[in-house]
């Protein structure tokens, strides 16, 4: 039950609401109770003053007969449930409620009245008629006739206590009732506001590798749940694209691997089908060797791309880029010479570079390899390395067949080849440029192409120079 968000939300809501309601009720109860007691004190004080005045004048009229004056005062004032007593020197002289209980005024109350100069108020409990709530007692010193008296008025507190108890009962009943209603309301509200989450969960559960193209329903793209659904949909789109490119890659890779394997098998079958002379065997083995080389290059390229997809960290080291470009140019000389292609190199300045040397070498070799592959005999390939403040630029251009405009956008895609048959005949697998692009980007650089069919192509790689230690 506590694993459900809407139940937890409701419980928190009820708890907070309960605390607020409880606090508010205590505050209201305390304020009302204080007001009721202070009102009672005020009325008892003024009653005591009035009673004292009346008693004084009745004493004058009855020529000092205290009992008669007190009786007349009580009759005129009709004190109701208020107990009245007159004391002289701590001795009860007369009282309106004369039963088995005596209005027991503590000694301290007389002293306080003497000192106060007005009614002094206190609470007493030990007089049986008042019940357990006790009574508010006002004592006032009165000079009437020839003598000094103490007038004591006691107002039982049970009415006020009962009123407050009734108020308390309302709170006791109302708070759990309000909490129940709030709980039910909160539960319904939480359930309603979380309904889209439940729907989303159900939809997401039904999405798998087979139907990755399906998306979650977005009811309102501006609210939190709408945004969550949009984010999840974006995630699904990215996954879908990755899955799709993986599927495509697997299909293309199998297709590419099939051809050399078929050639190797065919060549072996033909060679083994009958006895042949040494030259024929050599020829077959040369073809097998060629295709095996192509296969291992392709597998190497695929591994490099798998590394790219796995976001494997680069082996960063410091080296001179101009030396590396030099090495690469020398390595490609063999191919260039075989095709009578001239290669010029312009890398006059020393450029210290931090990066993955073997990957950068692979990138440069791929570009040079392409430039020589797709340039007819007698053509020219130039390599230029220039350094700026914060970046280096490597430009590889050739006077080859060029790349048609409609292919330039796809040229860096895996297994893409402008002319499949020609590329294969020169040993290409369509992975070289995608590796070059990944290497450039892994070093936070870019690779650009400028090409005119028939006139040649220029690939420009721009790499930022890292600050030493960065
Ligand atoms: P491949 O192994 O087939 O050369 P790449 O990814 O290196 O694969 O290149 C993709 C395609 O781009 C090639 O098949 C070729 O058609 C074209 N291409 C690459 N470089 C050049 C170039 N310098 N001149 C003309 N076409 C090129």
Image: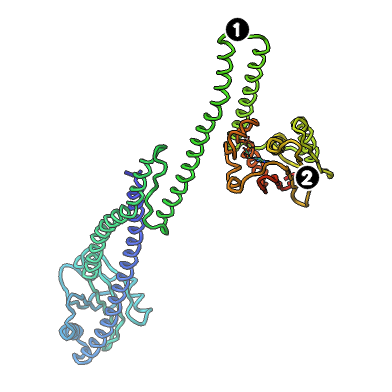
Q: Where 219 falls versus 339 (above or below)? A: below
Q: Nearer the viewer, residue 198 or 453?
A: 453
Quarter of the image where the C terminus is located: top right
Q: Where 5 falls versus 264 (above or below)? A: below
Q: Residue at x 24, y 84 (%)?
A: 51
* Ligand 1 is within 8 Å of the C-beta of the residue at disc 2: no
- Between circles 1 and 2, the one closer to the viewer is 1
Q: Which residue is mark 1?
A: 275
Q: Is residue 20 left or right of residue 358?
A: left
Q: Circle 1: is it few (<14), some (14-19), or many (20+) Cα within 10 Å?
A: few
SS class of the residue under badge 1?
loop
Q: Nearer the viewer, residue 204 or 289?
A: 289
Q: How is the image coloured?
A: rainbow
Give x and y (percent) for residue 430: 60, 36
Q: Nearer the viewer, residue 12 or 462?
A: 462
Q: Residue at x 76, y 45 (%)?
A: 468
Q: Is residue 385 visible?
A: yes
Q: Is residue 106 visible?
A: no
Q: Is residue 322 left or right of residue 422?
A: right
Quarter of the image for residue 443 reads top right
Q: Where 187 falls versus 270 (above or below)? A: below
Give x and y (percent) for residue 319: 78, 38
Quarter of the image for residue 333 reads top right
Quarter of the image where the N terminus is located: top left
Q: Quadrant of ligand 1?
A: top right
Q: Residue at x 71, y 34 (%)?
A: 358
Q: Which residue is mark 2?
A: 385
SS class of the residue under badge 2?
strand
Task: Work out how far the residue at label 1 is from the one at label 2, CA to CA, in angstroms.
Answer: 55 Å
Q: Of callouts 1 and 2, which one flags the residue occurring earlier in the amino acid sequence?
A: 1
Give x and y (percent) for residue 255: 52, 30
Q: Where 80 falls versus 275 (above or below)? A: below
């Amino acid at each position: 039950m506590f694993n459900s968000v809407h139940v937890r939300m409701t419980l928190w809501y009820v708890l907070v609401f309960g605390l607020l309601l409880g606090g508010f009720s205590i505050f209201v109860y305390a304020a009302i109770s204080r007001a009721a007691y202070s009102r009672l004190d005020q009325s008892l004080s003024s009653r005591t003053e009035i009673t004292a005045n009346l008693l004084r004048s009745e004493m004058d009229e009855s020529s000092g007969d205290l009992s008669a004056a007190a009786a007349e005062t009580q009759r005129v004032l009709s004190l109701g449930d208020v107990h009245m007593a007159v004391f002289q020197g701590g001795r009860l002289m007369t009282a309106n409620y004369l039963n088995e209980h005596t209005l027991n005024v503590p000694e301290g109350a007389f002293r306080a009245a003497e000192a106060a100069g007005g009614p002094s108020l206190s609470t007493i409990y030990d007089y049986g008629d008042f019940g357990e709530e006790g009574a508010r007692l006002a004592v006032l010193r009165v000079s009437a006739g020839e003598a000094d008296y103490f007038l004591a008025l006691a107002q039982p507190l049970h009415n006020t206590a009962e009123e407050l108890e009734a108020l308390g009962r309302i709170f006791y009943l109302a708070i759990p009732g309000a909490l129940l209603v709030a709980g039910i309301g909160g539960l319904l509200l939480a359930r309603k506001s979380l309904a889209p989450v439940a729907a989303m969960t159900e939809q997401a559960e039904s999405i798998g590798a087979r139907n990755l193209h399906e998306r979650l329903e977005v009811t309102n793209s501006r609210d939190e749940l709408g945004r969550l659904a949009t984010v999840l949909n974006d995630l699904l789109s990215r996954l879908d694209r990755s899955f799709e490119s993986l599927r495509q890659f697997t299909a293309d890779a199998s297709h590419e691997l099939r051809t050399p394997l078929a050639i190797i098998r065919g060549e072996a079958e033909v060679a083994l089908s009958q006895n042949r002379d040494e030259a024929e065997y050599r020829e077959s083995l040369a073809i097998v060797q060629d295709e095996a080389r192509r296969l291992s290059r392709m597998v190497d390229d695929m591994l490099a791309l798998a590394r790219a997809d796995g976001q494997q960290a680069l082996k960063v080291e410091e080296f001179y880029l101009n030396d590396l470009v030099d090495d690469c140019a020398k390595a490609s000389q063999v191919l260039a010479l075989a095709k009578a292609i001239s290669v010029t190199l312009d890398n006059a300045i020393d450029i210290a570079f931090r990066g993955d040397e073997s990957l950068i070498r692979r990138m440069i070799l791929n570009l040079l390899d392409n430039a020589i592959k797709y340039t007819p005999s007698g053509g020219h390939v130039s390599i230029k390395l220039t350094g700026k403040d914060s970046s280096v630029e490597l430009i590889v251009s050739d006077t080859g067949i060029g790349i048609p405009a409609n292919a330039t956008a796809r040229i860096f895609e895996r297994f893409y080849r402008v002319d499949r048959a020609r590329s294969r005949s020169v040993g290409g697998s369509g992975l070289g440029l995608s590796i070059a692009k990944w290497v450039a980007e892994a070093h936070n650089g870019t690779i650009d192409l400028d090409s005119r069919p028939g006139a040649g192509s220029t690939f420009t790689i721009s790499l930022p120079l890292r600050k030493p230690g960065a």
